[in-house]
Image (cartoon, rainbow, N blue to C red):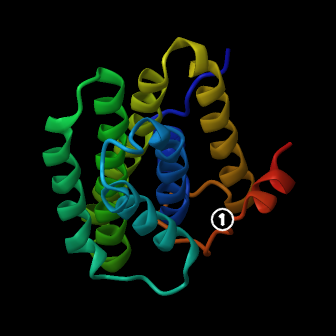
Amino acid sequence: MMNLPTTEEVEKLTLRAIAVYAARCARRATPLLRGLLDDEIIELPLRMAEKLGSERHLDISDTAAAPLAAAQIAAAMDSLNTRQAKLAALSLTRVADVVSMVLNAATNPTREEWTRGQRMRAARSAVKTPVHVVHALGKAAASIAIEAARSDYEVLLNEFKEHQNVVLGEPIELSEEWWKKNRK
């Protein structure tokens, strides 16, 4: 069985790749939340992360909007009755955290030490996202979710390379065709 990427591995990705990785992992658990939470609550952090990862222009307003999205999800979690649904929702709060930290890192490049800290915290939240997803989906789907997360990481690493310094990186194509083409 494959292992999920570590914080150290994810931290070497571009900032955009960290955001896309977290969003792709969390999106796998969203079927557990459909019909239980408002679609806008589910989609908002995912759209923010995907926009951050795929568009050249950074939407700085998402720096403030991301924590609000996380707070909405956290408030809605009280209405969820199963551990699996709560874990799926928790993965969405992680995505919102990643968006906030990536934007903080990307918009303050002259504060090198602080920027590295934001990237490290983004990577930590990003690697916790598939852990929540794996537990939410249960044993039957765990190996598939782990393999998908590892594969997403490897595609991002192969396409955008490893970076020791904090790098925003180029926008990332989000179409499934692009992902299929770039998988080994």
- Residue at which label 1 appears: 174
Residue beneath the point at 55% across and 80% down: 55
Residue appearing at x 23%, y 50% in the figure: 73
Q: Quadrant of the C terminus?
A: top right
For residue 14, which quarter of the picture?
bottom right
Left or right? Give the position of 109 relative to 67: right
**Vertically, is 34 above or below 78?**
below
Compared to residue 61, the image places residue 76 above or below, namely above
95 shown above or below 55: above
Q: Residue at x 23, y 26 (%)?
A: 81
Is 158 or 89 nearer to us in this picture?
89
Residue appearing at x 36%, y 64% in the figure: 44
Residue 169 in sight in this render: yes
Query: Residue 141 in the image: x percent, y percent?
Result: 59, 21
**Residue 32 sits in quarter:** top left
Q: Is residue 110 left or right of residue 56?
A: left
| Drawn side of residue 136 relative to residue 160, left or right | left
Q: Is residue 129 above or below residue 145?
A: below
Label 1 sits on what residue type? Answer: Leu
In this rendering, position of residue 128 left or right of residue 4: left
- Residue 110 visible in image: no
Q: Position of residue 4 (x, y in %)?
A: 55, 28
34 or 11: nearer the viewer: 34
What is the tally of numbered marks visible in this picture?
A: 1
The percent coordinates of residue 77 (x first, y second) are: 20, 39
Assign a secondary structure to mark 1. Answer: loop
Are there few (<14), some (14-19), or many (20+) residues within 10 Å of tag 1? Answer: some
